[in-house]
Image (cartoon, rainbow, N blue to C red):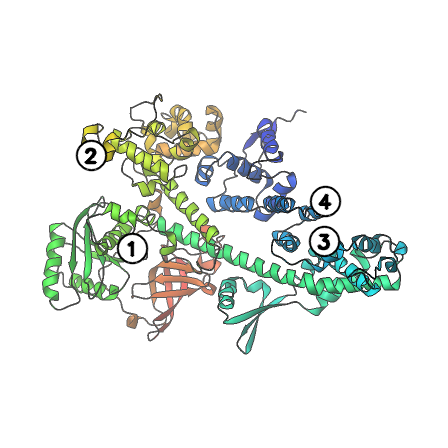
Amino acid sequence: VQVLGLVNVDTGSTYPLGQLEQVVDGFLQVQTSAVHWPSSKTDVSLLSALTCVEKWVCANIILLLREENTVPFMVRYRKEMINHLDADAVRDVQIVYEDSLAKKTNSVIQTLKKDGVLTPELEKTMRSCRSTDELDHVYSPYKKGSKLTKARRAKALGLEAAASALINAPQTLDLSTWVQPATQGLSSLKEVTTGVEHILADMIAKDPETLTYVKALCYDNSCVTVCFSRRNVCISFMHVCVQTLAINRGESLKILTVKVNIPDRVKSDFTWWCVNNRWRPKSMAKEEHKAIIMNAVDDSYKRLILPFLTRSYRTKLTSAAEKESIAMFVRNLRQRLLVCPVRGCVIMGVDPGFRHGCKLAILSPTSQIIHTDVLYLHNAGQQREAEKLRHLMTKYSCTKVVIGNGTACRETETFFADLIARRFFHPLDVSYCITNEAGASIYSVSPEAVKEMPDLDPNLRSAVSIGRRVQDPLGELVKIDPKHLGIGTYQHDVSAGALKAALEGVVQECVSFVGVDINICSEILMRHVAGLNAGRARNITEWREQNGPFTNREQLKLVKGMGPKSYQQCAGFIRIDPQTLVKSSPQPAATVTGKAATKKCKGKTGVKTADSLNPLDQTCIHPESYSVAAVLKHCVESKIKTNSVEELARVVDSTPETLKIIIDGLTQPPGFDIRQNFGQPDFKRGIVSISDLQPGTVLTGRVDNTTLFGSFVDIGVGRSGLIHKSKITLDKLPVSQRRRSLALGPGERVEVRVLNVDSQRGRISLDLIRVLQ
């Protein structure tokens, strides 16, 4: 029987043998470049075990990463290779892989080799380490600036052979022959015995099998004691994860102390195992030799292994807590970015204030600034300011008001609600919503804001940003550092690098999956498209300004810096919308002033592209699949009713996954936006006070933020209520959300019941009834 390929039984996808051999050969080769890719099946197996992803999927992801594919590209256009994993799962594999043990081990070995302290035994020990904690444990004595350890001093005196003989051939060992009265450290039998014990203790503490045994032995028997001044609070190791970051911060501020307590029975069990099993002499040993081994085991446990276990536990707890905190941050950010935009209407953005007035910005349906102003709604002369407000709203036919949730928000909301109740704006049907203004002030003074709105006061720029956050949340929020958006918790207590990489990844994912109209999108938004960066986005903008709008995706190849790989990664996420395509010719060079007049167009020569419109360029179909789409274009709607996708895939020689993308692209209406499945901000006409709430009251609201201990919900009373995590149970969630680590995210509409109201402290406790679809 000839093996032609393999079939993934979960998806039915087939993989030719040649492709699999290429994948296997790819990750089995030893790489000599700066990035060390997996060099053995063991590495792939370890990656699979750490991420709970099938080995063949891990191998495919590694291959795709080596080919410089982005996560959004893999998730959308290489589904069959990654077994339909979502972006978070692929990103987890990428992070674990790029931070792999093999990579760190090779780096440490190269450092030790450069320092001239690497021995074959040390290299073997390092390569047999099974975790980064073990590797750091072995490497720490050799770091620059570290003191010479007791074991290394003993080895320098030549006692390593004696320590080896004590285990392998104790009947031949006579320690008295090692005594040298004139040599310090060997001047007496006691000093020789002590030196041998130190070497044995070091060998025990760095032995992978021993470390594995002792960690397994005490994993379920440890607890973390957190000391608050005179009180000790014991928190179980398995339940401390969500409090770890808070504990770490308290310890760094010296408010509390943390100690890992391991029961004495762990030491007794470990000692027995070492003496009678792992470190038992291979032949008959004298009593004094057994005593040396016993002392070495005791010394190794107290001086080396116990500190290692403490560090290992603390590191594991911190790592798990950081991962959970970053995952929550990522999910909150994704939900915030994918809020459905409010299109087709004039909007007034309001940055509320007392002394300096309320800053207003009236925006057109396309987010262009129509008018800006400052009204003093909370000072004397309110009626005069209200008349002015009515004049502006009538003049520009503005019926939607967006109020920032900062200072004077509640008073401004009350002002508008009162006018609406009195039908002050009649015949206009005016409504308002409250939006999170976090980061608006920081953005208003940023170089990007100055470049975009050079003639506006920073306070008015904030009002513009607040309004645009409702008109196009994604396009506006990408201008702001995610850390300033007021989502997540403990952002200053997690790894800055890991948090930045995760947030940049989710921004790229959201921008790419929504897609950008290349002819009208901002340069800042364009930077976050998969395959593009700041330089390529700037080149595209300059090409667009000098040559006019793009008429098809192929013209992207004319842009400087847009190579085949960059084009492949970004093309499917870029749209050419005929409705926004401005029929204009390139500006003549004479119209450009200053230095730009002598600057040549940033483009390529000798690259031939079509200049006609392609209707597929406004879809999610990738150019690499245009030939398949052409075959299906005229028959997809009729065929899909009588044939399965799998049958059609065989007919056109494609994969079912690719075919589904093409079918979606051909059947979706023009201007389709994936965000239409997400909720919009809630506009309202009246106001409810916290004093109106009573226990048992049932309300609807929208999740404002999610933390490790629960979700905050905006129920329209000026204060967000808290649904404690204990109230978010599986039976209250839709089936699609029951596997999430974080059940609720920002923007989700929920029905809640008031449990308790503390008006003095402004606290509202809520119970989740259900998630509204």
Q: CA distance from mark 2 to mark 1?
A: 33 Å
> Can you identify the residue that label 4 sits on?
120
State the mark number for residue 207: 3
Q: Residue at position x 19%, y 29% from top?
A: 590
Q: Residue at position x 34%, y 45% from top?
A: 675
Q: Residue at position x 64%, y 38% from top?
A: 40
Q: Is residue 478 left or right of residue 210?
A: left
Dot 4 falls on a residue whose secondary structure is helix
Q: Are marks 4 and 2 in contact (CB under 8 Å)?
A: no
Q: CA distance from mark 2 to mark 3?
A: 71 Å
Of residues 91 and 633, the one nearer the viewer is 91
Please name the amino acid that badge 2 sits on.
Thr
Q: x, y percentage for residue 286?
A: 89, 61
Q: x, y percentage for residue 597?
A: 23, 31
Residue 291 in which image quadrant: bottom right
Q: Nearer the viewer, mark 2 or mark 1?
A: 2
> Can you identify the residue that label 2 sits on?
593
Of residues 257 and 750, the one nearer the viewer is 257
Please name the amino acid that badge 3 sits on.
Asp
